[in-house]
Image: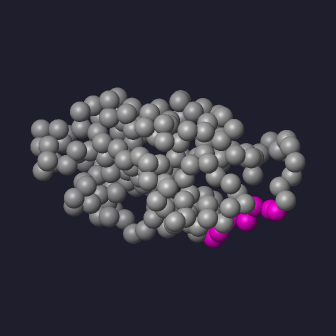
């Protein structure tokens, strides 16, 4: 409710498949993936600063993909507007700086025109298709984990979210015509209730 415009970035990062590129596959365990994820999160935080509104990430492990991380990042849409370009920038940082030589990424923005209900790119709170798309993303992020549970060491998490900073005072500009009513699955993902 603090921002009149939101830009949603959706992307996945991972590692070359060991079968296709055995020499590029680093010795991966959950701790190494966690450290790489943490390095990428620090970059995202530094890169976007106050424009970073909220994020969620989830580490998964699949037989074909191995370890990979799903991301959904919300930015202040009054500051940023080119989701595809920004995801490419983040993905290239992953490939060249976080896991040089072994990193891969997928930019979901390149396919957003194909989604029936798209919850990525510039978001309009009054568009029901946006909420449907975000609901699909929320369900996807909260589905049963792909074998990662037994691979988690210690008290590390395989999924987490950022904290939404509370609005300070009233938002400038005209009030919205309707109150913002979040669907239950999105409310659970964002606020945990």
**As drawn, is 99 to the left or to the right of 41?**
left
Q: Position of residue 69 (x, y in %)?
A: 38, 50
Say how many tags the image has. Answer: 0
Q: Residue furthest front?
A: 113
Can you say whether 103 is above or below 113 in the image? above
Can you say whether 158 is above or below 100 in the image? below
Residue 68 lies in magenta, yes or no?
A: no
Q: Position of residue 94 (x, y in %)?
A: 36, 36
Q: Position of residue 62 (x, y in %)?
A: 27, 60
Residue at image coords 70%, 46%: 5
- First to last magenta residue range: 178-184
Q: Position of residue 154 (x, y in %)?
A: 35, 52
Residue 181 lies in magenta, yes or no?
A: yes
Report the predominant secondary structure element of the magenta stretch. loop
State which quadrant residue 145 falls in: bottom left
Can you say whether 48 is above or below 28 in the image? above
Residue 146 seen in the current view: yes
**As drawn, is 122 to the left or to the right of 18?**
right
Q: As rendered, which of 182 and 133 lies closer to the eye?
A: 133
Residue 186 seen in the current view: no
Position of the C terminus, as image quadrant, is bottom right
Can you say whether 25 is above or below 114 in the image? above
């Amino acid at each position: 409710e603090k921002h009149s415009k939101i830009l949603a970035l959706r992307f996945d990062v991972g590692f070359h498949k060991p079968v296709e590129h055995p020499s590029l596959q680093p010795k991966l365990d959950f701790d190494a993936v966690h450290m790489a994820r943490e390095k990428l999160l620090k970059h995202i935080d530094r890169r976007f600063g106050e424009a970073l509104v909220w994020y969620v990430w989830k580490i998964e492990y699949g037989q074909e993909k191995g370890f990979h991380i799903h991301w959904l990042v919300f930015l202040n849409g009054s500051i940023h507007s080119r989701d595809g370009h920004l995801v490419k920038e983040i993905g290239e940082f992953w490939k060249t700086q976080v896991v040089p030589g072994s990193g891969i990424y997928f930019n979901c923005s390149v396919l957003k025109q194909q989604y029936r209900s798209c919850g990525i790119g510039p978001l309009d709170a009054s568009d029901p298709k946006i909420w449907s798309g975000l609901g699909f993303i929320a369900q996807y992020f909260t589905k049963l984990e792909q074998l990662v549970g037994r691979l988690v060491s210690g008290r590390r998490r395989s999924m987490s979210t950022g904290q939404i900073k509370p609005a300070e005072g009233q938002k400038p500009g005209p009030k919205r015509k309707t109150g913002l009513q979040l669907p239950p699955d999105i409310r659970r993902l964002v606020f945990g209730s």
